[in-house]
Image (cartoon, rainbow, N blue to C red):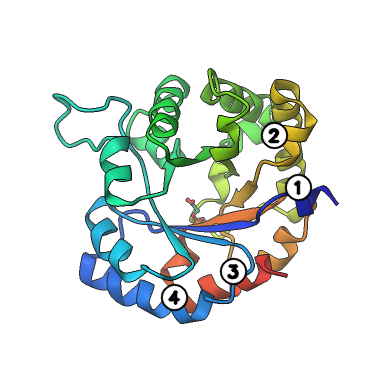
């Protein structure tokens, strides 16, 4: 029942894939396949593709996100992009704290918190990624770890701002590996995240937050994962690069 309070959102995370010309082709394939979606449909694309994709999706139900943003508004940060730059283009979403940013580019819980702050201040909706490494799961600290990541990232975020936060639970061992978490594992951690949100913001606000699962979600396993009571959508990497597969996942979330 609570699930009906929330909007299902399927977001593609294209990562470092697709030139602007390729991005145009892919998103144009997606438009007719996802036009009847009864869920939010978002594509998060490389910075250099934003213009092309924003233009291509005009007048459709597909919304556009970036894959990261810097926490400062402007200044001497060579190579970085601010949240205000994104909103000024018409971008609505931004992924923050993806495990690849944490693992390869030095993002920490503290910088994730700063990016979340900047993104919310600029008017963006944040897709905040949390999740454990395999060793952490094996040590039995998944729930504590994900709770800590969530709490730190949301430090200073008001209850009103929480309506512009989506949380993506992405076990790192499941990302790009073909090893999906079982539906029960995914649901257990999504439910834990909701408990944390409830302790911070109260149950009504927590029940309204979209919590996605991400990590090798694909056209075959999406339905089972999305059927779970606390899994409200998906953050899709590999399968979001194939219009047909992505649209099957969107359909599974629209049921
Ligand atoms: P994957 O990536 O679907 O390719 O596992 C998910 C993600 O990293 O967001």
CA separation in Å, label 1 and label 3: 17 Å
Q: Quadrant of residue 110?
A: top left
Q: Is mark 2 within 8 Å of ligand 1?
A: no
Left or right position of 99 against 225: left
Dot 3: what SS?
Answer: helix
Disc 3 packing (10 Å; few <14; some 14–19; many ≥20): many
Who is closer to the viewer here, 204 or 11? 204
Residue tagged by mark 1? 230
Left or right position of 94 against 171: left
Give the residue drawn at x 46%, y 39%: 99
Q: Is residue 72 above or below residue 131?
A: above
Q: Which mark is residue 154?
A: none
Query: Percent position (x, y) of residue 250?
Result: 59, 69
Asked if the residues shown at circle 1 and circle 3 are in contact, with their CB atoms under 8 angstroms apart, the answer is: no
Dot 4: what SS?
Answer: helix
Dot 1: what SS?
Answer: loop
CA separation in Å, label 2 and label 3: 23 Å
Left or right position of 89 against 59: left
Q: Which mark is residue 250?
A: 3
Does label 1 or label 3 sit earlier along the sequence? 1
Dot 2: what SS?
Answer: helix
Q: Which mark is residue 193?
A: 2
Does label 2 or label 4 sit earlier along the sequence? 4
Asked if the residues shown at circle 3 and circle 4 are in contact, with their CB atoms under 8 angstroms apart, the answer is: no
Give the residue drawn at x 26%, y 51%: 47
Residue tagged by mark 4? 30
Q: Is residue 107 above or below residue 173?
A: above
């Amino acid at each position: 029942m609570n699930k009906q309070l929330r909007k299902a959102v399927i977001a593609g995370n294209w990562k470092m894939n697709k030139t602007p010309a390729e991005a145009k082709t892919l998103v144009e394939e997606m438009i007719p396949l996802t036009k009847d979606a009864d869920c939010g449909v978002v594509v998060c694309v490389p910075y250099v593709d934003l213009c092309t994709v924003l233009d291509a999706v005009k007048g459709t139900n597909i919304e556009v996100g970036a894959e990261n943003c810097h926490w400062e508004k402007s200044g001497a940060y060579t190579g970085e992009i601010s949240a205000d730059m994104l909103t000024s283009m018409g971008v609505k979403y931004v992924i923050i704290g993806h495990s690849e940013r944490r693992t390869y580019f030095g993002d920490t819980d503290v910088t994730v918190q700063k990016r979340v702050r900047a993104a919310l201040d600029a008017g963006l909706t944040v897709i905040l990624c949390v999740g454990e490494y395999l060793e952490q799961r094996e040590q039995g600290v998944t729930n504590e770890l994900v709770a800590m990541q969530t709490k730190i990232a949301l430090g200073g975020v008001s209850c009103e701002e929480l309506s512009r936060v989506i949380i993506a639970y992405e076990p790192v061992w499941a990302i790009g590996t073909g090893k999906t978490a079982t539906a029960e594992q995914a649901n257990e951690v999504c439910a834990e995240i909701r408990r944390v949100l409830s302790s911070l913001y109260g149950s009504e606000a927590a029940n309204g937050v979209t919590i996605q699962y991400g990590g090798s979600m694909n056209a075959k396993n999406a339905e089972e994962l999305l059927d779970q009571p606390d899994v409200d959508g998906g953050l899709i990497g590999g399968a979001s690069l194939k219009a047909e597969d992505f649209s099957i996942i969107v359909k599974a979330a629209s049921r």
